[in-house]
Amino acid sequence: MIYQSTYQAARLIAPKVESIFATHLTAARESGEDDLAPLPTANVVESILDATFWASLRKEEGHSPKISLAFLPPHQAGNPLLFKNRLPLNPSVLTKLAPGIERAGIHLGIWIEDEELYIWGTTVSIPNFCFVVDVSEPGLLVIKHRRIYGFGKFTNIAVLKGDQVKMVDGNSTNLPDCPPMLLSLLDLTAPSYWNDSVNLLIQLAVSMRTHGRGGILLVVPTENANWLQSIIKPIQYYIQPSFSGLSKLLSQERKEASQIFWQTALKREVEHLAGLTAVDGATIITSRYELLAFGAKIGRAKGKDNIDELSFSEPIEGGSAVVIHPAKIGGTRHLSAAQFVHDQHDATALVASQDGHFTIYSWSSYQERVQAHRIDTLLL
């Protein structure tokens, strides 16, 4: 190719990425799937990552690029916006184009002819297992693909931050009580629509992480109020009756003609609920997404021991579970969430840190202890 890569992490990871996409595409073809994206070969992966990485470190009128690149030919892009003249794939061009394509869901289309990569235009439609590279901050690249059923968040393959490479490891979920939310993020569950209960938790997690203030979301059973034993009284922002905006929306019958309006309303309710987690304290919802309280202070339930260990893991290569003290994961927010799940085994806690880390806490009957899964690598 004309463009020679100098980003060493791209060269290191490219063969692994090609192998992962080849496995996915082969399995999809054997199961009869169509509308499949082309295979990104190692040299294509390396060149796209290199150009994107160096572009991410530049600025255009004081702003860092926030871009998404997709590898596909124009004829697979639905209704693409096509440039009259092809543009070369290099950091300078990417930096100049970035201000016009930074909105979510817009991809720069990249293709290759005569061993040369070029930019052909933009698209909002990409095929299954399309190789995508996202940049949300300088030096941070996320390799992902569109889920085979097209619903929900894209599935992450790897995260590169400078010379640090994190490869997502789907084999890290072999335990029998792995949280459904983690399985869905790894694309290991049966097909699920973007508006089912698991994917709604993912949308809430993404929104919580986006506001950047940190927060705790506690999901408690609808059937009982045992969670109150682990909350310090009085609760400053107790909601009575419980707020059911999101819950009612989920129970509505939807006609195809009004689907887009329903999805817009759902996103608005998700943003509303996730926004409350920015208030100091915990936001508490039922498993049916009814809001019970926010700004709540967590305390150890009467008769319960202090939590002194949990199982911590991250779904990346080298991130196997280790038993540690919960204080080693984070500060007071993490410790209080772990204590809550230690006392309330039927609850789940989602914790966003101000530094961008995101952790799911749940009770493992198999291990008989709290398990913590750090999932920010999957939420990017």
Image (cartoon, rainbow, N blue to C red):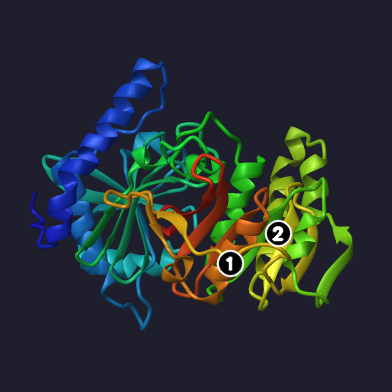
Position of 41 compared to 286: left or right? left
The answer to whether residue 130 shows anywhere in this view is: no
* Nearer-the-camera pick, 322 or 102: 322
Q: In the image, what residue occupies the spot 37% across and 61% down?
A: 67
Q: In the image, what residue occupies the spot 66% across and 69% down?
A: 277
Position of 16 compared to 70: left or right? left
Whole-percent x, y for residue 366 in the image? 51, 39
The answer to whether residue 280 shows anywhere in this view is: yes
- The tag on residue 306 is 1
Whole-percent x, y for residue 263 in the image? 69, 47
Q: Residues within 10 Å of mark 2 (few under 14, many from 20)?
A: few
Residue 217, relative to residue 236: is it above or below?
Answer: above
Based on the displayed image, in which of its 4 quarters is residue 284 positioned?
bottom right
Question: Which residue, given by chain and number where applicable, does mark 2 sit on?
Answer: 268
Quarter of the C terminus within the rendering: bottom left
Instruction: Identify the amino acid type marked 2.
Output: Arg
Label 1 to label 2, Cα distance in Å?
Answer: 38 Å
Q: Earlier in the sequence, mark 1 or mark 2?
A: 2
Disc 1 versus disc 2: nearer the observer: 1
Instruction: Identify the amino acid type marked 1.
Output: Asn
Q: In the image, what residue occupies the spot 53% across and 68% down?
A: 334
- Indicate the secondary structure of the residue bearing disc 2: helix
Q: Residues within 10 Å of mark 1 (few under 14, many from 20)?
A: few
Whole-percent x, y for residue 25 in the image? 32, 28
Residue 310, relative to residue 75: is it above or below?
Answer: below
Position of 212 compared to 108: left or right? right
- Indicate the secondary structure of the residue bearing disc 1: loop
Whole-percent x, y for residue 138 in the image? 31, 72
* Nearer-the-camera pick, 69 or 343: 343
Position of 25 compared to 337: left or right? left
